[in-house]
Image: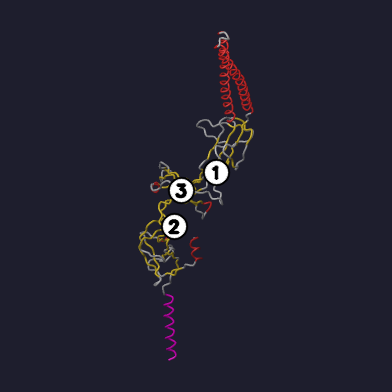
Amino acid sequence: MRKTAVLILAVCLAVAGYWYLSREQPVQVYLATVDRGPVEATVANTRAGTIKACQRSRISMPVGGQVAELMVDEGDEVAAGQTLIRLWNEDQAARVAEAKARLAEHKAAARENCDRAAHDGRELDRQRGLAAKKLISDEKLDATETQARISAAACARGKAGITTAESSLALQSALYQKTLLKAPFAGVVAEINGEVGEYITPSPPGVATPPAVDLIGAGCLYVSAPIDEVDAAAVRLDMPAKITLDAFRGRVFEGRVTRIAPYVKEFEKQARTVDIDVRFDQIPEDVQLLVGYSADIEIVLNRHEDVLRVPTEVVLDGNKVLRYQAESGRLEQATIAVGLSNWTYTEITGGLNQDDTVLRSLDTEGAVDGALVEPIETPADRAEFDRQ
């Protein structure tokens, strides 16, 4: 009897062990919850864009000459009109001084002649009064009139001499200014080509030579990036955009579309793109944005507020998702209706309800329609999954 009981117990243990070892094992998965929030329809650049300055000038000297003085260093902030480079110009400075002296001389001579003309004019009025009373001869009156005309002509000639001297001074001053390289706008000196004592030669027509100074305007930056010709058709001026940079991962900067290129560019005979310019709404004070940084843009075509949404990564081909059934612990394939969509979120217009959960880790082996799953949804696990 005892042997029979032991045999039965052994058989039961064997059956239980077989059942335990052969039972279906749940697949550990990450889930995403259907929530509410904004969803945007966006288009993005096909290749990396570049940060550019709204104002940038590669300035060259208008005349050749020897560099006498470098007034700034690379990296200096300069004001509009500030002198950057001065060529040797002592000869031209002397010509300006000579022109100023001649102008002063002409002004003094004109003042003398005009004072004499005024005196002779008053004398003519007096003589005419005497002639009316027959107190002077006609010859005396004629001589006075002639002298007044001569003095008036001398005064006019003196004023003309002033105009000529002023023009000469303006010419010499303009030639002098050509020996000074000045900033056309406020900005930062990015590069200087030349040293004191070197000879600078202007660029001949059609021949590119390094600029004397590369000046980058301050306070206005934008991103120029190519958009696929199909996507570019929906872009309009002043549309909002988001700017991201590899140099500042995790930061998003706001901008606006300021230019849409009027032609389609063919890049290496492959994709056809349209260059789009997006200007920063505000330059952040806590980061230094450098001209030449690579940047990406995401232009917002449309935006729906407070709608049902899921992460775009959970949506399968054919607008399907794997919904988690808490009662059975299994995944169930569901077809959804979608609205706006971008790389981050997809709007749900039908097929799911708020707080439903769907499979997020689509690449998990065994996580298919009908599979028994075990959710892993702690904050730490979710953060680790997002980093992956």
Q: Would you say residue 104 sits in the magenta stretch?
A: no
Q: Is disc 2 surrounded by few (<14), some (14 to 19) or many (20+) residues within 10 Å?
A: few
Residue 183 x/y as whole percent: 57, 37
Quick check: 100 left or right of 18?
A: right
Asked if the residue under mark 2 is in contact with the one under mark 3, i.e. CB atoms within 8 Å, the reply is no
138 versus 358 height, above or below? above
**N-terminal label among 3 and 1:** 1
268 vs 74, nearest the viewer: 74
The chief SS type of the magenta part is helix
Quick check: 102 left or right of 370?
A: right
Which residue is the site of mark 1? 218
Residue 27 x/y as whole percent: 43, 69
> Residue at the spot x=44%, y=75% of the render?
21
**N-terminal label among 2 and 1:** 1
Type of residue at label 2?
Thr
Residue 35 x/y as whole percent: 42, 63
Asked if the residue under mark 1 is in contact with the one under mark 2, i.e. CB atoms within 8 Å, the reply is no
Q: Nearer the viewer, mark 3 or mark 2?
A: 3
Report how far apart the C-alphas of labels 3 and 2 lie in the structure: 21 Å
Q: Is disc 3 surrounded by few (<14), some (14 to 19) or many (20+) residues within 10 Å?
A: many
Which region is colored magenta?
A: 1-22
Type of residue at label 3?
Arg
> Residue at the spot x=49%, y=67% of the render?
378
Q: Nearer the viewer, mark 2 or mark 1?
A: 1
Which residue is the site of mark 2? 344
Q: Quadrant of residue 144?
A: top right
Which residue is the site of mark 3? 256
